[in-house]
Every structure is written in C-alpha cells, then in structure tokens.
Amino acid sequence: MLDTPLTVREVTDRIRDLFDSDSVLADIWISGEVLESTVSRSGHVFFTLSGNESQLRCVMFRMNALRQRSLPSSGAVCVAHGKVEIYPTEGRYQFYVDLVEEAGIGLAALELELLRQQLEAEGLFSESRKRPIPANPAVIGIVTSSTGAVWHDIQNVVRRRYPFARLLLAPAAVQGVNAPKELIGALQSLLLTETPEVIVIARGGGSASDLSVFNDEALIRAVFAAPVPIISAIGHETDWTLLDLVADLRAPTPSAAAELVTPAIATALERLAESLDLHINRFERDLTTRFVDVELWRTRLEQHGVHSQITRLESLRANLLQGYGFHRDQATHRSAQAAELLEALSPAKTMKRGYAFVEHSGTGRPVRSAAETAPGETLRTRFIDGAVESIVTAAVS
C-alpha cells in the first residue's frame, strides 16, 4: 500500500505504461460492426467498433483517412488495424486506426494493403520520381532465375531486336522464403560490379503466393534506392505486385520487358536516317541563306559597276554549289555504310551462312574461346532454326 495517494495523472501514466508494454495492443487487427461514424471538420474520423456486447472507441487521423479506399460507414462490418492506447485527457482507452477494410478480406491481403499505404505515404510510388528508360542501352542487367524459361526468352528477344546490347545476368531465386534476400543480393551485385544502364527484374507467371516475394518491403526499398532505372516484369499482365508500383516502368510480361528496353534494328536505321536528313536540311537552309546574300551583293555591285567583285562572287557561288554537292554525297554515303554495317552485324544474317552462336547454358554468357569451357560443363549452341545443348568432354586444338 502506498503511503501517499497518487494523482489522477500518475494513475493514467501507469495505465499507459501497461498499454505500451503490450506488444499485441501496439500492432493489432480488430473486427467489428461500425457504429456512429462521423468525420470532423479537420478531417479526422471518429467511430465505434461493436461486437459481443462490447464497444471500442476508434479514431482515424486525417492523413490516414486520406489513404483509405473507403471510410467506415455505420452498420458495416469491418476489419481495422492500429494500436490501442490510453487517451489521458479523458482517462479512457481508444483504438488509433491506420487502415480499415470491409470484413471478408484475408489477413495477408490486409497486411499487403497496409504496407502499400505506408510506402505510398513515404513517396516510394510517386510518379514524379520515375526515371526514363534509355533508348539505346549498351548494357542491360537482368535479375531472374538462371534455370527458367524467362532468361532464355529475354535473350532471344534482345538478340532479334538489338544484338548490340550486352546482357548481364544476376541469378536469383524468384519464389520461396529465401527469394527476397537473393533478389536484393543479385540487384546489389549488378550495381557493384559493372553498372548497367537499366535493370529488368523478371519471373514468369504463378500463384499469388508465388509472386508474394515481390511484395517484400526490403526488396521494394532496395529497388527504390537503385541509381539506375528498373523495369518490373512479374507474372502475366493481370498480376500486380508492389515491385510494379516502385519500378520506373512496369512490363506486362518478361518478353515485353525485353522489347521495351531495346529498339528494333529497323528503328535504329530510321533514327539514323532521320538524323542525317536533319543535318542535310540544316545545311540546305544555310546554303540558301548564303545564296540570298550572294545575290544581294551581286545586285548591289552591278549597280555600282564593280565587275571584278562580281567575278569573285560568281566564283564563291560555284564553290558553294560544289561544297553542297560534296557534303550531300558524303552524308548519303555514310548513311548507306551505316545501314550495311547494321545489316552485316545482324546475328541472323551470320547464322544463315552456316555459323552458330555458343553460350554457357546456365548464364547465357557467350563462349569466345575453348579456354572458357570446362569438362562436364553444359553449352548451348544456337542455329538459325533452333538450339542444341551439349556437354564438354575435352578441349582440343
């Protein structure tokens, strides 16, 4: 027994300490029927949850209320998340709510929605921070499984559309309890070794449970912190994860990501032609301006009878015409050379002549020398109409 009585505030503080020491009350989901739901002029929402002949006063502050898909309405059965604390001013406890949803939604979905709202409030999904994807990337990083079909599909699309790009594979598990950690490690390894201009994180379709690894908070924050643009390519077009929201660009499928990140060779030729046309047109405009100046001075000199200067202007005019023809021929020649080079570098044309492309089966890395192989290793040899896999038995010279 205490020697002196406690003040009301001292009692309230002791009760608050009891609430604060209870980890369940600090992070709790509560279901019940909504009673007396009102919104104050300041935007705060006050309501009561009722159930089993008990009632719990609730408050949702304005910033949390603005993030809700819908506010609690009287008579509705809801599930709410938040913390239970003492309200010292009135000496009663109440439920401070940060998320409320209609009952019937699974707990995993509710947890995901709560995380989505928290990350959105921090600005991780803001459109203003999205970065443009480079038009002609020389180095593209790929984070995916090295054994799945996704990696081979991406390679095929890139080789067909833009064989000048170099692909860097950072293999990682794309499902299972260890997948988030492996995905983060693969992403960081790409950024530490040889920084690519853009990174694609990809996996094929799967169940909601399979794709849940791409909702991992640590992975989302790692993607947000990446210094280069990230493209998400997870599952099918109808599948959505938090990775899609934080990525700079979302592709509906892995193959679509490979197309979005590379220009077609034909497109590259068109851009080259447009650039040359632009320079030629600019030269023609400059030449026209010079011709106008020459004719203006010619007229003035004729009026003053200065025949020697007229002869010099005629020579200048002839030189301009000759220079224009030379530069136009040079531009046309360079355009034709570039087109021939692009065509000659096309792997498809080379393969049609009987050549093949050899790569390490696990990573897709090109095999440039027999010294890069080892006995027992599986190699993939690509021909114009398909591919075969073989096992190295020995290197011969």
Image (cartoon, rainbow, N blue to C red):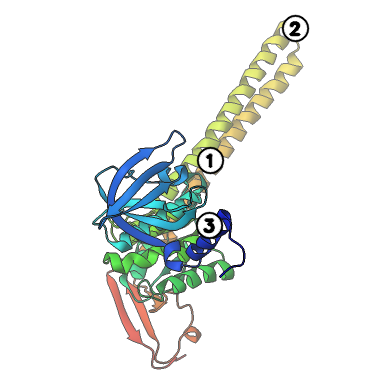
Indicate the position of residue 378 as horizontal and vertical percent values: 37, 85
Residue placed most toward the observer, 70 or 158: 70
Q: What element carries label 3?
A: helix
Q: Which residue lies furthest to the top in this view?
A: 303
- The amino acid type found where label 2 is placed reads His
Residue to which mark 1 is pinned: 329
Mark 1, secondary structure of its residue = helix
Residue sitting at 46 percent across and 67 percent down? Answer: 22
Label 3 crowd bin: few (<14), some (14–19), many (20+), radius 10 Å: some
User: How far apart are the two marked residues, 2 and 3, measured between alpha carbons?
Assistant: 107 Å
Quadrant that contains the N terminus: bottom right
Q: Can residue 310 be seen in this view?
A: yes
- Which quadrant of the structure image shows residue 291? top right
Give x and y (percent) for residue 190: 52, 68
Q: Which residue is drawn at 38% across and 67% down?
A: 213
> Mark 1 packing: few (<14 Cα in 10 Å), some, or many (20+)?
few
**Closer to the camera: disc 1 or disc 2?**
1
Q: For mark 2, what is the residue?
A: 304
| Three-letter code for the amino acid on which mark 1 is drawn | Asp
Disc 3 designates what residue? 12
Q: Which of marks 2 and 3 is nearer the N terminus?
A: 3
Give residue 74's position: percent from left, percent from top. Answer: 27, 42
Q: Which of 391 and 43 is in front in this view?
A: 43
Give the total number of marks visible in the rendering: 3
